[in-house]
Image (tube, rainbow, N blue to C red):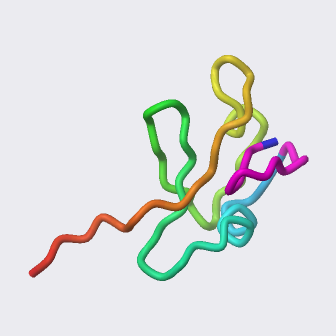
Amino acid sequence: MPIINGRRVEKDYMSGDEIIREAQPEPGRRVVIRRGIDAHTVTPGKSYGPRELVDKKNRPVKIETIPDRTKGL
């Protein structure tokens, strides 16, 4: 049961597409799973299970949007 944009979602399994849809990223932003200071980008086709949606202390992970990492030309 992750926390997406400050709201707890009562699901143990979620697909990457479902997580991205719930987070509603604006253009130029990507959705990440935040565990402490680590941030991992959500993969659209992947299924996320209970072990990936909680941290090592069994607390729900935070899913949020951050700016895309692009370099100027």
Q: Residue at x 64, y 43 (%)?
A: 62
Q: Is-magenta flag for residue 11?
A: yes
Above or below, 53 against 36 in this view is below
Q: Quadrant of the N terminus?
A: top right
- Majority SS type along the magenta span: loop
Residue 70 image position (x, y, % from top left) = 25, 70
Query: Extreme front residue here?
Result: 6
Query: Extreme left residue here?
Result: 73
Please state if 54 lies on the left or on the right of 37 as rendered.
right
Above or below, 45 against 49 in this view is below
Residue 66 image position (x, y, % from top left) = 45, 60
Q: Quadrant of residue 56?
A: top right
Residue 13 image position (x, y, % from top left) = 82, 48
Q: Quadrant of residue 4?
A: bottom right
Q: Residue at x 46, y 44 (%)?
A: 39
Q: Residue at x 53, y 61 (%)?
A: 65
Q: Quadrant of residue 28?
A: bottom left
Q: Is-magenta flag for residue 57?
A: no
Q: Quadrant of the C terminus?
A: bottom left
Query: Extreme top residue here?
Result: 57
Above or below, 48 against 43 in this view is above
Q: Residue at x 74, y 59 (%)?
A: 15
Residue 59 image position (x, y, % from top left) = 73, 27
Please state if 4 lies on the left or on the right of 12 as rendered.
left
**Magenta stretch, residue numbers:** 2-12
Marker count (numbered) = 0
Please state if 36 lies on the left or on the right of 28 as rendered.
right
